């Protein structure tokens, strides 16, 4: 009993290991809750932080101005998630198809692509506005 | 009362339709004590007839195509498909492969899908997909 007591007391005062993402309890009205989150009235309990933000591979960010339209990213993309827009000589990236390998970032000669920390992506429409990067 | 409980406690039937197992691991990770989706009543069930949500992982191979359709038809309405990973959404790295029947929407065109992109997606992203499914089912209830 006595050796156990220390462990018992320790466990009584430590926080549970569970990350309560996205909320402690399921909200009564999920649609309204998500609207509140966007308006800043409610806050989501944040996900487990990424281990190394420098090398984390999230959603692609595309710098339209820097892009020269050399098609190097299209050549290296293993899942053909990048489409070339002929008239404008720019690219369009479908995040639904992207496998977040960041090979396009390495291939890009003008540094127009990089990976962000954003990874909470889910939608009923796979070509929703924020799932297509232009 | 029953409908109230329904949109909260989603029971998920998980189908591996030709996945590499990466997404399967992440689906299981979402149920571990670290994220604990079971505190909302979301759990994996072993029978599509008990399920509200079908979680498909992987591009659909020609072997699995018939089974995917059958599993979808066995699940009672209203139902939502949770497509986990880039393969089920657009084929991912397996796109244009010779034995591929997928993506999912080509097999089941009129289904409601929640797409979770990633290769594989993080467990939080999968939970976020379930939140989107909640939101959709709320909309169905209002109608």
Image: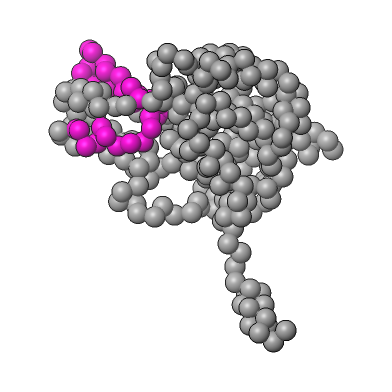
Q: Position of residue B140 (x, y in %)?
A: 70, 25
Q: Residue at x 59, y 34 (%)?
A: B132
As for residue A63 lying within the magenta part, the answer is no
As for residue A85 lying within the magenta part, the answer is yes
B79, A5: nearer the viewer:
A5
A124, B93: nearer the viewer:
B93
The answer to whether residue A105 is visible is yes
Q: Residue at x 46, y 26 (%)?
A: B87
Q: Quadrant of residue A51?
A: bottom left
Q: Residue at x 29, y 37 (%)?
A: A102
B73, B129: nearer the viewer:
B73
The answer to whether residue A29 is visible is no
Q: Position of residue B90 (x, y in %)?
A: 45, 21
Q: Which residues are magenta?
A: A79-108
Q: Position of residue B80 (x, y in %)?
A: 65, 27
Q: Quadrant of the N terminus of chain A?
A: bottom right
Q: Quadrant of residue A129?
A: top left
């Amino acid at each position: 009993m006595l050796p156990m007591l220390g462990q018992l007391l320790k466990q009584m005062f430590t926080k549970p290991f569970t990350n309560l993402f996205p909320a402690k309890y399921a909200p009564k009205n999920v649609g309204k809750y998500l609207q509140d989150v966007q308006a800043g009235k409610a806050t989501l309990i944040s996900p487990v932080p990424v281990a190394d933000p420098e090398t984390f591979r999230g959603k692609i960010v595309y710098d339209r101005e820097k892009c020269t339209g050399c098609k190097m990213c299209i050549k290296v993309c293993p899942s053909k998630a990048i489409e070339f827009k002929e008239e404008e000589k720019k690219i369009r990236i479908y995040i639904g198809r992207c496998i977040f390998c960041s090979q396009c970032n390495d291939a890009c000669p003008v540094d127009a692509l990089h990976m962000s920390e954003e990874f909470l992506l889910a939608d009923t429409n796979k070509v929703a506005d924020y799932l297509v990067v232009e | 009362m029953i409908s109230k409980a329904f949109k909260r406690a989603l029971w998920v039937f998980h189908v591996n339709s030709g996945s590499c197992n990466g997404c399967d691991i992440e689906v299981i990770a979402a149920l571990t004590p670290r994220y604990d989706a079971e505190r909302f009543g979301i759990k994996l069930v072993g029978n599509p007839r008990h399920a509200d949500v079908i979680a498909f992982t992987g591009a659909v191979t020609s072997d699995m195509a018939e089974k995917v359709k059958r599993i979808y038809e066995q699940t009672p309405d209203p139902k939502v498909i949770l497509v986990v990973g880039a393969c089920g959404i657009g084929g991912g790295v397996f796109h244009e492969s010779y034995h591929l029947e997928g993506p999912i929407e080509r097999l089941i065109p009129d289904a409601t899908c929640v797409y979770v992109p990633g290769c594989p997606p993080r467990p939080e992203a999968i939970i976020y997909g379930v939140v989107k499914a909640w939101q959709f089912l709320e909309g169905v209830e209002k109608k």
